[in-house]
Image (cartoon, rainbow, N blue to C red):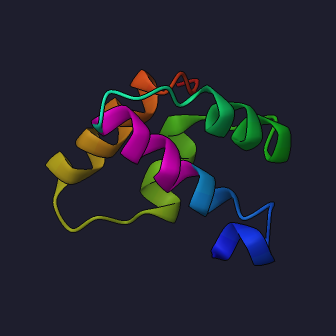
Amino acid sequence: KVLERTPDAVEAHIILAAVHAAQGQEAQREQQEILRIEPDFKLKEWVPRRFPFKHEEDTERMMELLRKAGLPE
């Protein structure tokens, strides 16, 4: 629903990319959308700032999934 109302909601695309990667599905469409919206996207800059998990291992897990989705460090 978020993407229906706001197609450029990069956080929603990031979450979808992580979910697809966690399920072993292709995340290329989400990866392309993220890089279209934020061409300078870097995992180490975005994830801790936009997804401030309480536990470091949760941050690392999110970054691992987004790496699997093909997003740049």
Range shown magenta: 14-22
Q: Position of residue 53 (x, y in %)?
A: 28, 64
Q: Residue at x 73, y 31 (%)?
A: 32
Residue 29 spot, x, y in % from top left: 67, 33
Task: Classify 43 as above or below 24.
Answer: below
Identified at 70% across, 42% down, the residue is 34
In the image, is residue 21 part of the stretch drawn in magenta? yes
Q: Is residue 53 above or below residue 1?
A: above
Q: Nearer the viewer, residue 51 or 34?
A: 34
Q: Is residue 20 magenta?
A: yes
User: Would residue 34 appear left or right of 11 to someone viewing this image?
Assistant: right
Q: Main secondary structure of the magenta part?
A: helix
- Position of 17 with respect to 4 (left or right) is left
Position above or below: 6 against 62: below
Question: Where does residue 1 sit, x and y in percent of width and height?
Answer: 63, 76
Task: Count every numbered label the image shows and give the total.
Answer: 0
Q: Nearer the viewer, residue 65 or 43?
A: 65
9 or 48, which lies in front? 9
Question: Can you give x and y, in whole percent of width and height, for residue 65 in the image?
Answer: 35, 34
Please give left or right for residue 12 compared with residue 48 in the image.
Answer: right
Residue 28 falls in which quadrant of the image? top right
User: Residue shown at 38%/33% (left/top)?
Assistant: 21
